[in-house]
């Protein structure tokens, strides 16, 4: 298990009421199950960046990684 | 001229401010079929008068205020009106779209549009009640800020029973009075911000226009319109962009996405990321300052924010202001941005151009080109500086000219971030090639919306390859035409986002969304085919409610193909008018920073491949190599008489 820092942006941040939290997970799929107040179905639609790079669901996490979870956003 | 179509009031008034004369301006049903309303109707009127020798501050210029046929019909987000004129900033035609109530009340007064020409001999405000025009002295209003002006006008429109007669207002603040080149016209808390329309109104000595009345706005098929509108509202409320993100976070919600995609303009567009973006983000705004969100008449999206600043409830900043007065000048103090946003609205000034002119001045000072005392991240005294701009005092008098003119005087053209003299919006285009093209070719100058807003495909919505040039020119043309027409009908451009089916926006990781992202750059030929043969699309798209809504409101036939053809006509009409003022390919340019300097030194594609994109774009549009519409194209678009 890797201990990672998770930052939340967009509507998901308002929904959880949290801007960041720490979690332990091996993969992104595992991490997505730990977002408070967000169902797995909703978590599936979050955009994920690991250390600033777009990452797929099977991405293996390493200790100290910074994960960004963001709701889809567009139009301004 | 009276009309047989629904949605229109059938009358446009021309007011000669010099002679204080009012006359009806002829606008026929044939012209309505071709030029619809809003910015297209205004372009037709300007195109019939401007020869290419006029100046913005002259008797020959006009301020043309128009509504669209959907304005006030109950269609969603359809309270818009448009102001077009010859821009003092660019010297070309500009069109500036505004929400609020004014458009609705202009139609209640019995008018589709107003044409203002000439110059009042003393400060004046105009009252229009059911087509009747009254001129009033405005000496005591001159000098007032925009909210003070509107409150004073409400007092004058108070009836015997103490209630204020229902009305819509537009007015200018001190910036317009003093002809700051990027002065805005304000309506309630909304602004016709871009292009310097407020400076033209200031030159006219016209402080405000109030309109009202009790005319009925006709709808061709009321029953069908009501049913369709209900369906349309439901669709917008269910869509992830118009039903969730914009109502919850407003446009400010894009700051974080822009940071992740490297398109967040920072330090005068020298970078696409700001280390302290979180402190000036939409999330922070919602968590710490937002009281409630607000919307225009009949708008289900409700994208505006009300925030509290120093105990006062005021309109919150849009994304552009947040970014350009945040990371744009290396400022991480959100409360300062809220305050400046309010102050700029009160003074009646475009926040985008004001912010970009400021960041240019800061860089020019740091580069030793202009000793003005302004530095990035030093924000003390900026409120005072904005006042100095509005009242043309000291250094403010120079800043009132905008970044293009300053760079011509002091140097630093490579980092004066404008196109055709108008400053760019908050999206850094080196990682959004299509938007870069849009900024350069846009008829009104550095505008993201008139430029086609391709960034919605390039990371803010879909995730098409941001730096590829493939397909971007054709898609830019398509979205420019689409938005041109939506604007002309009197609707908010945000309704265009529903053009993207909900699943694509809601499920960014789904296989079909990834497929669309990968395929779109290779769909240019299909877009071009559709543009060439719109009759192939004689249908209504299920995700695009605009065409049926237009038919029910007006009684005019309107397929999707026809809708796009009308948008194309409008875009080419403005280009054709600008040709008279010298626009051609050599004016479709961006500053060297964006086309020559890499945003990321390790990514050779992180700059706008402008020349390559322009070549494809001109070809797609049917323009010649010099970027001008051909005679054949003008004939096809029925613009040969223009």
Image (spheres, rainbow, N blue to C red):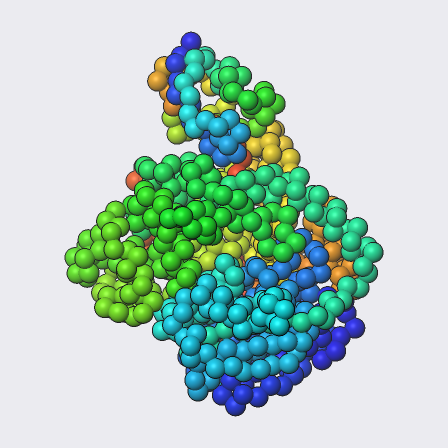
Q: Position of residue B546 (x, y in %)?
A: 70, 54
**Residue at the image position 74 percent from the left and 68 percent from the top:** B216
**Residue at the image position 49 percent from the left and 66 percent from the top:** B151
Residue B41 seen: no
Q: In this orientation, which residue lies closer to the viewer: B532 or B12?
A: B12
Q: In this orientation, which residue lies closer to the viewer: B306 or B530?
A: B306
**Screen quadrant of the C terminus of chain B:** bottom right
Q: Position of residue B91 (x, y in %)?
A: 42, 73
In the rendered view, tell whether residue B405 sits above or below residue A62. Answer: below
**Residue at the image position 64 percent from the left and 40 percent from the top:** B239
Q: Position of residue A73 (x, y in %)?
A: 52, 38
Q: Quadrant of residue B396?
A: bottom left
Q: Position of residue B17 (x, y in %)?
A: 51, 84
Can you name the residue that lies furthest to the top here?
A1
Q: In this orientation, which residue lies closer to the viewer: B19 or B571?
A: B19
Q: In this orientation, which residue lies closer to the viewer: B625 or B175?
A: B175
**Screen quadrant of the N terminus of chain B:** bottom right
**Left or right placement of residue B331 versus residue B452 in this view:** left
In the rendered view, tell whether residue B484 sits above or below residue B112. Answer: above
In the rendered view, tell whether residue B453 sits above or below residue B488. Answer: above
**Residue at the image position 62 percent from the left and 60 percent from the top:** B79
In the rendered view, tell whether residue B468 sits above or below residue B410. Answer: above
**Left or right placement of residue B205 versus residue B267 in this view:** right
**Left or right placement of residue B350 versus residue B45 in this view:** left
Q: How many marks?
A: 0
């Amino acid at each position: 298990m890797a201990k990672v820092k998770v930052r939340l942006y967009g509507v998901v941040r308002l929904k959880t009421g949290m801007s960041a939290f720490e979690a332990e997970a091996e993969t992104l799929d595992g991490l997505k199950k730990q977002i408070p107040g967000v169902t797995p179905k909703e978590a599936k639609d979050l955009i994920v960046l690991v250390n600033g790079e777009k990452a797929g669901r099977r991405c293996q996490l390493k200790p100290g990684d910074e994960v960004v979870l963001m709701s889809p956003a567009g139009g301004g | 001229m009276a009309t047989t179509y629904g949605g229109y009031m059938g009358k446009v008034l021309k007011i000669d401010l010099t002679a204080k004369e009012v006359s009806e301006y002829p606008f026929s049903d044939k012209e309505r079929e071709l030029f619809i309303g809003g910015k297209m109707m205004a372009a037709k009127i300007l195109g019939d008068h401007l020869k290419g020798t006029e100046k913005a501050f002259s008797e020959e210029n006009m301020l043309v205020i128009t509504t669209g046929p959907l304005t006030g019909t109950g269609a969603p987000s359809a309270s818009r009106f448009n102001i077009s004129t010859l821009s003092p900033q660019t010297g070309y035609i500009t069109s500036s779209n505004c929400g609020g109530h004014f458009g609705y009340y202009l139609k209640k007064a019995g008018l589709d549009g107003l044409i203002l020409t000439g110059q009042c001999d003393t400060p004046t405000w105009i009252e229009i009640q059911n087509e009747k025009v009254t001129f009033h002295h405005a000496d005591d209003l001159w000098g007032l800020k925009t909210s003070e002006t509107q409150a004073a006008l409400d007092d004058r429109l108070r009836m015997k029973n103490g209630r204020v007669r229902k009305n819509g207002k537009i007015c200018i603040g001190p910036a317009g009075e003093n002809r700051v080149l990027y002065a805005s016209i304000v309506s309630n808390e909304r602004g016709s911000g871009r292009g310097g329309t407020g400076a033209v109104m200031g030159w006219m000595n016209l402080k405000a226009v109030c309109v009202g009345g009790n005319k009925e706005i006709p709808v061709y098929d009321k029953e069908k319109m009501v049913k369709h509108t209900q369906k349309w509202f439901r669709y917008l409320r269910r869509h992830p962009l118009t039903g969730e993100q914009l109502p919850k976070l407003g446009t400010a919600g894009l700051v974080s996405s822009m940071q992740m995609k490297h398109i967040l303009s920072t330090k005068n567009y020298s970078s696409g990321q700001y280390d302290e973006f979180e402190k000036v983000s939409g999330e922070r705004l919602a968590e710490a300052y937002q009281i409630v969100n607000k919307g225009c008449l009949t708008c289900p999206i409700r994208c505006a924010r009300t925030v509290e600043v120093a105990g006062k409830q005021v309109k919150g900043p849009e994304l552009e202001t947040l970014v350009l007065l945040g990371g744009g000048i290396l400022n991480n103090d959100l409360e300062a941005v809220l305050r400046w946003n309010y102050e700029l609205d009160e003074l009646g000034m475009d926040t985008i151009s004001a912010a970009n002119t400021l960041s240019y001045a800061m860089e020019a000072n740091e580069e030793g080109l202009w000793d003005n005392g302004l530095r990035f991240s030093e924000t003390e005294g900026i409120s005072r500086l904005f006042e100095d701009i509005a009242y043309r005092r000291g250094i403010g008098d120079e800043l009132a000219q905008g970044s293009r003119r300053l760079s011509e005087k002091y140097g630093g053209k490579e980092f004066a971030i404008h196109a055709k003299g108008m400053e760019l919006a908050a999206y850094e285009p080196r990682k959004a090639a299509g938007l870069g093209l849009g900024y350069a070719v846009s008829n009104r100058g550095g505008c993201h919306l008139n430029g086609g807003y391709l960034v919605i495909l390039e990371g803010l919505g879909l995730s098409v390859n941001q730096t590829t040039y493939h397909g971007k020119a054709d898609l830019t043309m398509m979205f420019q035409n689409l938005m041109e027409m939506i604007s002309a009908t009197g609707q908010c451009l945000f309704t265009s986002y529903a053009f993207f089916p909900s699943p694509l926006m809601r499920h960014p990781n789904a296989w079909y969304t990834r497929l669309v992202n990968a395929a779109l750059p290779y769909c240019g030929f299909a877009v071009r085919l559709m543009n060439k043969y719109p009759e192939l699309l004689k249908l209504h798209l299920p995700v695009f409610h605009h065409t049926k809504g237009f038919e029910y409101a007006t009684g005019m036939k309107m397929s999707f193909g026809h809708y796009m053809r009308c948008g194309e006509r409008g875009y080419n009409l403005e280009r054709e008018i600008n040709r008279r003022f010298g626009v051609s390919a050599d004016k479709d340019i961006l500053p060297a920073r964006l086309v020559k300097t890499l945003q990321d030194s390790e990514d050779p594609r992180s700059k706008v491949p402008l020349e390559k994109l322009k070549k494809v774009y001109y070809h797609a549009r049917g323009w010649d190599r010099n970027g001008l519409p051909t005679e054949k194209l003008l004939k096809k678009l029925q613009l040969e008489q223009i």
